[in-house]
Amino acid sequence: QVQLVQSGGGLVEAGGSLRLSCAASGRTSGSSAIGWFRRDPGKEPEFVAAIAESDSDTYLADFAKGRFTISRDNAKNTVYLQMNTLKPEDTAVYFCAQKYYDGSYYAPNSYGYWGQGTQVTVSS
C-alpha cells in the first residue's frame, strides 16, 4: 500500500506563487513516476505535470509551461509542484498521483494511488 500525503496550497492573489508537496510512504519501490492533476467540480481531472522515475524526464501541460515546475527530492520521497504567476483559472483542487499502469503520463487512468487533494484558489 502506498500513501501520498499532500501539503501546500491555499489562497493567493493573481501573479503569486504556491508550492505543492506530495510525500510518498508505504510500499514504494524507490522513486516512482508522480503526476499532478487538477479538477474543477463536475469536470474530469486535468493533467498538470509529471516527473518520471528518472529525474531528467518531466512533462508539463501547455498551460503550465513557463509557469510551473515539477521536481523531486528522492531522499525525502517527495515531489514538488512549484506554481508561479498564478491566474484565477488555475483555481482547482490539485491531486498528486503515483503512476502504476503502463500508459500515458497525461492520462489519469495510468495512475494507481492518489493523494487527498489540496485546494488552490487564485483571486483576481
Image: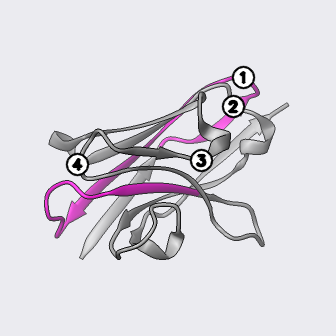
Report helix, strand or loop for mark 2.
loop
For marks 1 and 3, the one nearer the N-term is 1
As measured in the structure, the alpha-carbon distance from the residue carrying label 1 to the one carrying label 2 is 5 Å
For label 1, the crowd category at 10 Å Cα-Cα, with few meaning under 14, some 14 to 19 and many 20 or more, is: some
The residue pinned by badge 4 equals 77
For discs 3 and 2, the disc positioned in front in the rendered view: 3
First in sequence, mark 2 or 4: give its number: 4
Kind of residue at badge 4: Asn
Q: Quadrant of residue 28?
A: bottom left
Q: Amino acid at mark 1?
A: Gly
Give the extent of the magenta segment.
8-37
The label number, if any, that marks residue 61 in the structure image: 3
> Is 21 or 89 nearer to us in this picture?
89
Q: Distance of mark 2 from mark 4, alpha carbons?
A: 26 Å
In the rendered image, residue 92, in percent from the top left (x then y), is placed at 69, 53
Q: Quadrant of the C terminus?
A: top right
Q: Residue beneath label 2, please?
A: 86
Residue at 33 percent across and 73 percent down: it is 100
Asked if the residue at tag 2 contacts the one at tag 1, i.e. Cβ–Cβ closer than 8 Å, the answer is: yes
